[in-house]
Amino acid sequence: MATAEELLPEVKEWLRVDGDDEDKTILTLLYSAKSILKGSGVPEVTDTDDKELFEQYKLAIFLCATHFHENRIPVVTGMTAANLPFSLQNIILQLKAGALPYEPRET
């Protein structure tokens, strides 16, 4: 299982953050991203599971953390609240579908 602490260096590279000043904030975003995915019905995927599925799960975490890193204020005067990006919504749906048990149809 990839913990937030283990993902921190990759996410900092993804966000292009140098130094350690924002580590606490980014860790909070990582924990929140995992929680949001879980709350969306996405089970946690580990690196011992399907590797491609694990990379997709990590991408969802990265996109979610990026969204909240770049949109720190949910509502700005004169603008609407920022929704989750379509790419993240799409990955969440794919991960949820991948977690469903496969039952072949009888013909």
Image: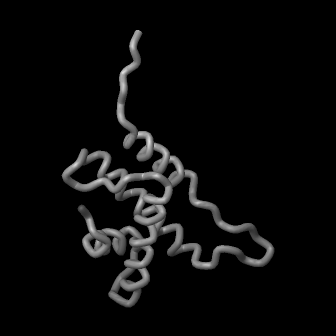
User: Which residue sits furthest bottom?
Assistant: 21
Q: Is residue 31 left or right of residue 79?
A: left
Q: Is residue 105 above or below residue 22?
A: above
Q: Quadrant of the C terminus?
A: top left
Say above or below: 14 vs 27: above
Task: Answer left or right for 17 relative to 68.
Answer: left
Q: Position of residue 85 (x, y in %)?
A: 57, 57
Residue 75 horizontal/vertical position (percent)? 70, 74
> What residue is drawn where x is 36% and y is 84%?
23
The residue sitting at 77% across, 78% down in the picture is: 77
The quarter of the displayed image where residue 31 is located = bottom left
Vertical position of residue 105 compared to residue 39: above or below: above
Q: Is residue 16 above or below residue 102?
A: below
Of 88 and 13, the residue lying toward us: 88
Residue most toward the right? 78
Residue at image point 26% right, 55% down: 46
Name the side, left or right, on which 86 lies relative to 49: right
Q: How many marks?
A: 0
Viewer-proximal residue among 38 and 91: 38
Left or right of residue 79, residue 14 in this image:
left
**For the point 51% across and 47% down, which residue is it?**
90
